[in-house]
Amino acid sequence: MSMFPAATYQQRRAALLARLRDAGARGLVLLPGHVDSPMNYRDNAYDFRQDSSFLYFCGLQQPELALLVDIDGGDATLHGDDIGIDHLVWTGPLPSVAERAAQSGIASTATRAQLAATLAAARAAGRPVHFLKPFRGESRLALSAWLGLADAQLDDAASRVLTLAVIALRAVKSTSEIAEIENALHVTRDLHHLAMRMSRAGVVEQEIVGAMEGLALKHGRRLAYPSIFTSRGEILHNHDHSVKLKGGELIVNDTGANSALGYASDITRTIPVGGRFDGLQAELYDLVLDAQTQAIAAVAPGVPYRDVHELACRVMVEGMKSLGFMHGDAAEAVQEGAHAIFFQCGTGHMMGLDVHDMEGLGEDDVGYGEGFVRSALFGHKSLRLARALRPGFVVTIEPGVYINRWLTERWKAEGRHAGFIDYAMFDKHADFGGIRIEDDILVTADGRRELGPHIARSRADVEAACAG
Ligand SMILES: [Mn+2]
């Protein structure tokens, strides 16, 4: 099983301890790994995916492990049970918990029963047990039992100091983590170029989705998230793949593979079925690409991501004005949220072990804070990342134009933003669909670097890749 050298995980755990002690925390840190998640009965489980924070601090990709760190004493213990002969006949020999612990540089191991006893003793002694907000049902049940808390109490009882320390560490990617993300992007490039070659009239979306997933599997990889591959690109997270492609329509393909160590990639390309962007498609494609290019160029340390987002929105409003969709002052239109008639989401998010990195720990703690408060306005409120960028952050830049008939009808009836929006134009192009272009960007000490190999992105390059 591939992982970083043991020293990497030892350094991460030491950095976590240092942060917790600096913050005055004491007691225990409990990081439960995931258990298998049954599909229909216990022994038929979904593909195993380790909890990303456990993975970050231990690197072990097996179920039913838990890490306990004593903040006061400094020692770490890996809890898990060695398999017996009943299990062995089904799985073959597996490394012992002690062998796994050694791979992660952990000297001490104990059973899961001992974990329950240690936690009970800590509670009886009044020692705090720090844990992260759990998002899986199985983890919630285990924490409830270990800590004597009702499910409804778990979120509030999760440790703020631990949450903020984990976010601070995971947000800044090391050179070896960047290499993992770029490794994932090499596979992702092949998925996207395959999809471009396959996008012909008469092909059902699912055939292409299946071919992409199969290619990822051929490399021993999983997808980092379920593919979005749709001619209804205006539906931001459309997972229906039943439609037969028609010549002349646009496909939004949002697909990314994982690296071997579980790091994500997140790439979107927009594909013209038949291989040619025409008329308005070409104009809007170039507009989205211009917004993406300008937004990427604005990424730098110290720059609030919210400024990058607002820049992308303004560039698109200016372009939509020149095409007759919008009027008025672009900056004002963006401040008031009128751009959300065609761009209902944020420009991007953090990415790392999770495609929306650490979202399970709390979107606002990951993307806001430091004086940044989430907007309540439709559109801007979906921005997942606002705060100032730092070297080592990996972010996506993914502007788009989405013409959504239901939103247009609703806002037109309300007369919303009538000074900025030409509703006749949106009506006329109500079936346009959507365009999104997304890449993964590393914030460097002096600016930014686009991660991964080149994936056809200019209109000419996409058309050439469609021709194969
Ligand atoms: Mn994304």
Image: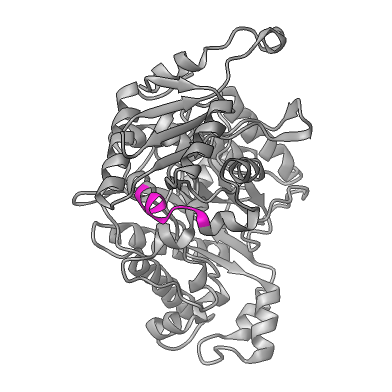
Is 266 colored magenta in this rendering?
no
**Identity of the residue drawn at 66% across and 57% down:** 249
Q: Tell me if residue 182 comes above or below residue 383 in the rendering.
A: above
Q: 101 or 467: nearer the eye?
A: 101
**Identity of the residue drawn at 31% across and 34% down:** 73
Residue situated furthest front in the rendering: 125
Is 158 colored magenta in this rendering?
yes
> Image quarter for residue 114?
top right
Q: Is 383 situated left or right of 169 in this image? A: right
The number of numbered badges drawn on the structure is: 0
Residue 35 rendering spot, x and y as whole percentages: 62, 32
Q: Is 324 situated left or right of 240 in this image? A: left
- Rendering colour mode: one colour
- Quadrant (top left, top right, bottom left, bottom right) of the C terminus: top right
**Identity of the residue drawn at 48% across and 57% down:** 362
Q: 127 or 38: nearer the eye?
A: 127
Magenta stretch: helix, strand or loop mostly: helix
| Residue 263 visible in the current orientation | no
| Residue 457 visible in the current orientation | yes
Query: Magenta residues, as a range?
Result: 157-165
Q: Tell me if residue 356 comes above or below residue 363 in the rendering.
A: above
Q: 138 or 450: nearer the eye?
A: 138
Residue 419 rendering spot, x and y as whole percentages: 51, 92
Residue 235 rendering spot, x and y as whole percentages: 66, 62
Q: Tell me if residue 38 comes above or below residue 281 in the rendering.
A: above
